[in-house]
Image (spheres, rainbow, N blue to C red):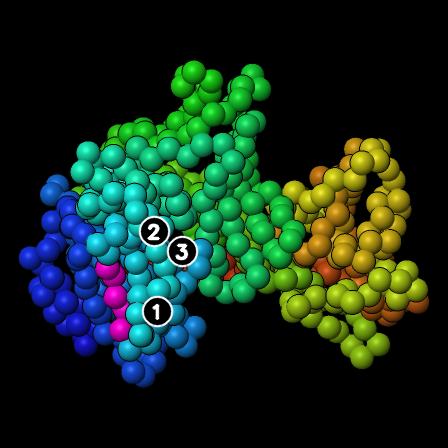
Amino acid sequence: MKLCLFILFIHFLTYGHSNSDINIGYRVTLAVPMEYSLGFIGRAFIMETDQMAPKFKVALNVEAVEEKYSCSIDVLLGDVRVWSSGHLSRFYATEKCVVELTQGGDLQLKGQKEQVGWRSGTSGQGVQRLNLLRTGNLVLVDDLNMIKWQSFNFPTNIMLWGQRLNVATRLTSFPSNSSNSSFSFEIQNDKIALYLNSGKLKYAYWEFKPPDNQNITFIKVGNKGLELFGDKYTKITQIPSGRLEPLRFLALGNETGNLGLYYYSPDTGNFKASFQALNSTCDLPLACKPYGICTLSDVCSCMRFITRDGFNSGCSNGSSVGFCSKNQVEMVELQGVTSVLKGTPEKAKYVSKEVCANLCLDDCKCVAALYSKLGDCFLYGIVRGVKQVAWGSGLSYMVKVPKGTSGNHGKSSGVKKWVFVIVGVADGLIIALVLGGTGYYVIQRRKNLGDDNNST
């Protein structure tokens, strides 16, 4: 309750300035709490567009993040944050959070003792005003309304209607439960694609290519879908939304890494997805923990290995980290399992399964390999995005583990059986519970009907 009152109080104080533009010399200060409060968000709304709901608004934002307070300038559409100055690099402030459009035309965020934590870098360029356009684009302009800086040039994880992204640009998002992973939606000459980034490693998990190998120049969100344009600004194809309502934005999910097109529903007062690139939980790159398998029932099951000390769960930081020598590690084969991540392909084509396994064993950075019956071999530096597929798919997923993990004198057959016993049991238990519940209901129903007939 205190949080809501705080936001409304600041809003009323600054409502006189809540139009679509402010001039040089403008300054607003927001107090930062002395003590850390988990979940705290304080906002001073300083600008808004003159249009029907949902409106675009600009806010000076103070938010509790990782035991500190982040200070940022945010653009919101309704309750959705569609742009933030702190998206890629947060500015942490104490005592106060200040936004100022200086006399020199530089938009700045400041903290204690006038410390500058973020700036537009437009000092000396003749900037006179900060405008919020009806498209949600936050712009700095001069007396001739020439744009000197705009938020559309610094995309976050959301692309608004009418915004254009050229080739070699991207959207990025950061899952809160992973410190070294991020998702990216990238526009390339021949395709648009989703990637999981883990440290220096990068793996694609979804892509869309234009027909007839046409090159992409830029993309934008239209009323009815995501539109792809080629040379001479010609529209070459689009990903349709599947809804009659006009689209408002495209978003790359922070937690899931899924890509969606969103429209506004007046009935519910919120935004809903009309298209999602991935429609199954098991197709998400981080659906399960490291060394976890997403089963056919869309639940996660840990890989479990037999060690000298008994059973060891693989849902952890991994079993093969730090092992390079072939004398220390071996490959465990999991048939009927694949990865949604597109690994690094080996240059050699039509290799055998044994050669593929040895390629991973020889590479200290490799922790898993995917082999297909066509002779393709892909290497991985992480064990994520693993999912169960139907038997007979011709795919073989191999994981590097410490030698002797199988508890079978270096042979991996016992480990293979154990892994699929665990996965099969997980699916079997769910099916048994469903069938058992249904059977119990039918039996009880018949019994109750029989009792009613006897009473009659």
Q: Is residue 263 in sight in this rendering?
A: no
Name the side, left or right, on which 266 lies relative to 338. left
When the figure is inspected, residue 96 is found, relative to residue 424, above or below; the finding is: below
Local packing at callout 3 (Cα closer than 10 Å; few below 14, some 14-19, many 20+) is some
Q: Residue at x 73, y 61 (%)?
A: 419
Point out the residue furthest to the bottom here: 35
User: 108 or 174, which is in the foreground?
Assistant: 108
Q: Is residue 405 in sight in this rendering?
A: yes
- Residue, disc 1: 115
Q: Magenta stretch?
A: 96-100
N-terminal label among 3 and 1: 3
Disc 1 is placed on an element classified as loop
User: 454 or 259, which is in the foreground?
Assistant: 259
N-terminal label among 2 and 3: 3
> Given the image, on which type of amino acid does mark 1 rest?
Gln
Q: Distance of mark 3 from mark 1, alpha carbons? A: 19 Å
When the figure is inspected, residue 52 is found, relative to residue 295, above or below; the finding is: above
Disc 3 is placed on an element classified as loop
Q: Distance of mark 1 from mark 2, alpha carbons? A: 15 Å
When the figure is inspected, residue 40 is found, relative to residue 23, above or below; the finding is: below
The quarter holding residue 372 reads: top right
- Residue, disc 3: 87
> Given the image, on which type of amino acid does mark 2 rest?
Ser
- Residue, disc 2: 120
